[in-house]
Amino acid sequence: SEGRRRCDNLAEQLERVSESPIEGLDRPARLAARVVEVSQTLAPAVRERRSRLRRARSEAEDEHRHLSEVRADLSRRAVDLARDLATVRAAAEHARQDLRQAESASSEALEEIRSEWGATLEDARREADVHGPETEAERHRFARKLKRFGDVNLLALSQQDTLRERHEFVTAQRADAEAAANELNRIILAIDGEIEQRFTETFGRVRRAFGEMVPRMMEGAAGVLDLSEEGVEIGLRLGRKGWRSLHVLSGGERALLALSFLFSIFLSRPGRDGGAFCILDEAEAALDDLNLARFLAVVDSYRSEGQFLLVTHQKRTMAAADVLYGVVQDAAGATTVVSKRMQGE
């Protein structure tokens, strides 16, 4: 507004200059001179006004900056206050919940005092005041006992009948199982005794038969059977050669020894009156003519007590047989089983 007034004054002065004559000058010259004079008069005021405007703008900028800082500080304080308000509200809600729980616990305690002891809270307080130290000591003692007692199953009374029935059932089952186990042990002992007895009797018969069979299979030899922790041990004495180990015997001697053991088991079976049936597959393949003759003589001596089926390629064995069975191929290439009875021919 001050600048506007100064401009209006300058315009009025210019009009007066243009109307007033200046001695010795024409009108344009006078106007120019007057403008220069007025300009020189207004220049300090303009400079001063510009300085004031700059200071005012600087002050306005400082004030704006200060207001911005104040606004930012107020914003931060508003955020902090909002956070504090939320915290206080949460704490108040938690306190209300604790209060409700405390009131509920108090109500339950009052109801428990009323139902368990038939008294009120005032009665309990009066008793506590009268017996204060003793009650406190007794409470601590019971608290220690309860802590050592551990967890309490509140359903124990309702579960007692079920557990009793289960216990009686399991007891009966255990008694039955123990009786069955005792009976099984008795049967096992009886079977073990029977097995041991029969094995002893059978082994005795086999040992006697083996002692009689070895000299018949091998001239001048003697054999014996013994029991050890490892099983049945076979001993063989060959005339003047003395007792020999099995791994030093020849193939024929091993075959004769095995046949002697086999015939000892076969011939020592009880109840052989009904006849026996024995199959030998290439049993005499490793025997020479002399030992083969001894083997066939043993088989022939027991022919009336059973049947012997010999699978063989030895001609002398075939010649000693009663019936021959074989497989032949006809002209068409088909195989056929044939038999030939040799007795009396």
Image (spheres, helix red, strand yellow):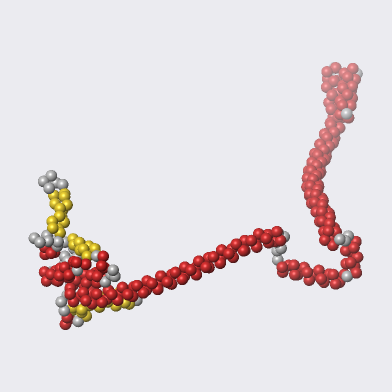
Q: Is residue 303 left or right of residue 62?
A: left
Which residue occupies the foreground of this view, 51 or 72? 72
- Residue visible at 71% across and 63% down in the picture: 152
Residue 62 placed where, x, y %?
A: 81, 41
Q: Residue furthest left?
A: 345
Rendered image quadrant of residue 296: bottom left
- Residue visible at 85% across and 59% down in the picture: 114
Rendered image quadrant of residue 233: bottom left
- Residue visible at 79% across and 47% down in the picture: 86
Which residue occupies the foreground of this view, 299 or 34? 299
Q: Is residue 302 left or right of residue 130?
A: left
One can see residue 65 in this view: no
Residue 162 placed where, x, y %?
A: 65, 59
Residue 70 placed where, x, y %?
A: 81, 43
Which residue occupies the foreground of this view, 115 or 128? 115
Q: Quadrant of the N terminus?
A: top right
Which residue occupies the foreground of this view, 125 or 87? 125
Rendered image quadrant of residue 192: bottom left
The answer to whether 67 is drawn above or below residue 238 in the figure is above
